[in-house]
């Protein structure tokens, strides 16, 4: 009977340790996402500068590809991708409501795409919000 209690206690300790490990991994991934969102422009600008010597438009195209890829990566790591699409949808809905019928469809699509572009250009704000949300979740789950 004593051996069974020791085995159960070891199992409970393992579950608690796994929970702390998962919370730590989530925090690390979120921090990496924030760092990507904060500093993606440094290598993107260097690549833009180097490729603009080869062709004038090539550097800009690669810069935008790096910007979008790093924003998606940052939002995925911080868990903010659904939040970004939700806010972009709300902005598009506002643009859709404000104008009459034939123009509202174009306005809704344009405001949605503009919101997504702005979220791709400035990912640090929403990456930090996602990181803070993860910090709060892990702090409350460990109590």
Image (tube, rainbow, N blue to C red):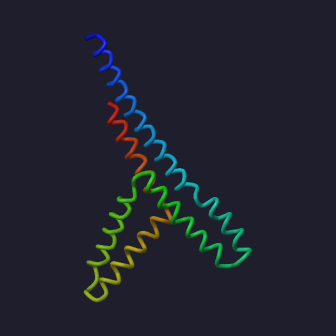
Q: Residue 140 versus residue 79: which sits nearer the camera?
A: 79
Q: Residue 106 versus residue 5: which sits nearer the camera?
A: 5
Q: Is residue 3 left or right of residue 42?
A: left
The percent coordinates of residue 66 (x first, y second) are 57, 65
Q: Outermost residue toward the top?
A: 2
The percent coordinates of residue 116 (x first, y second) are 42, 69
Residue ID at (64%, 60%): 43
In this picture, is 53 found above or below 84?
below
The percent coordinates of residue 65 (x first, y second) are 55, 69
In this picture, is 96 found above or below 140?
below
Q: Quadrant of residue 40?
A: bottom right
- In which quadrant of the rendered image does the C terminus lie? top left
Q: Quadrant of residue 97?
A: bottom left
Q: Quadrant of residue 52?
A: bottom right
In this picture, is 111 found above or below 37?
below
Residue ID at (73%, 75%): 54
């Amino acid at each position: 009977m004593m051996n069974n209690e020791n085995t159960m206690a070891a199992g409970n300790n393992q579950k608690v340790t796994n929970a702390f490990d998962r919370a730590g991994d989530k925090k690390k991934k979120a921090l990496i996402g924030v760092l990507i969102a904060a500093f993606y422009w440094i290598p993107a600008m260097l690549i833009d500068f180097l490729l603009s010597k080869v062709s004038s438009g090539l550097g800009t195209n690669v810069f935008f590809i790096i910007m979008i890829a790093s924003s998606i990566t940052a939002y995925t790591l911080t868990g903010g991708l659904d939040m970004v699409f939700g806010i972009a949808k709300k902005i598009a809905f506002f643009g859709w409501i404000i104008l009459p019928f034939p123009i509202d469809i174009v306005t809704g699509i344009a405001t949605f795409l503009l919101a997504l572009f702005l979220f791709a250009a400035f990912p640090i704000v929403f990456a930090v919000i996602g990181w803070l949300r993860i910090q709060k979740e892990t702090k409350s789950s460990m109590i």
